Structures are given as structure tokens and as C-alpha cells.
Amino acid sequence: HKSMRKILKVERLPREKVVYVGDELRDMKAAAKAKIDGCAVTWGIHAENVLMQEGPRFIARQPSDLLRVFGLEAFRPSPVLTSSASVL
């Protein structure tokens, strides 16, 4: 968390504009100690129930959920269509 605080200071980043994305409990603990919003991703080291122990502000259950977290839903790629796919 000390290194995160240093980065915030050196880069002049306001805490409310930073999200720490991580897949381990220690990531969520570091975010909490640095007073930065945490985003737990569930496809990594620790399971969702473990990550939730530190109360992250966001949870991403699949990579595309990160688009929502960062307000980039409009940039979601179109699905790839194959010959067996149907368009609704």
C-alpha cells in the first residue's frame, strides 16, 4: 500500500479516480489500506467469497465486467458470428 500511495502522489492521481484490480485477498487488503477502491476479479487466485472478505467496491466475474467498472460499456466488442450463430 505504501508503493500505491507513492504512485498516487508522484503521478498526482486523486484516489477517487483510481481502482486497484486484483485476484488475491492481499490485493484487496492493499487497496483498502491505501484507501483506493478495489475491484476483485474472480478468475484468478482466490475465489469470490475469499475476495469479498475485504469488501471491494467492485466485483468482476468475467473480463468484460471490467468495461462496466471503468464506464466503458460502449466499447464492448461486437460478438463474433459463426455460420452456426443466429442474429436476433
Image (cartoon, rainbow, N blue to C red):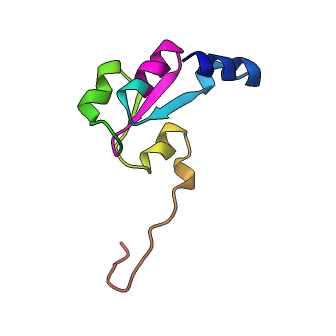
Which residue sits at x=43%, y=49%? 63
> x%, y% of residue 31?
49, 21
Comparing 80 with 5, the one in front is 5
- Could you say which is closer to the camera, residue 57 or residue 48? 48
Q: How many marks?
A: 0
Name the outermost residue toward the left.
Answer: 49
13 w.r.t. 84: above or below:
above
Q: Is residue 46 above or below residue 84?
A: above
- The quarter of the rendered structure image containing the N terminus is top right
Q: Quadrant of the C terminus?
A: bottom left
State the image coordinates of residue 33 (x, y, percent, origin top left).
Answer: 48, 13
For the point 34% across and 78% down, the residue is 86
> Which residue: 54% across, 39% down?
70
* Quadrant in the rendering for residue 6: top right
Residue 5 falls left or right of residue 34: right
Residue 3, by quadrant, is top right
Residue 58 shown left or right of residue 3 in the figure: left
In the figure, 41 relative to 1: above or below?
below
For the point 48% across and 34% down, which residue is it? Answer: 21
Q: Which residues are magenta?
A: 27-43
| Residue 26 among magenta residues | no
Whether the magenta-drawn stretch holds residue 29 is answered as yes
Residue that extends furthest to the bottom in the rendered view of this protein: 83
Q: Quadrant of residue 61?
A: top left
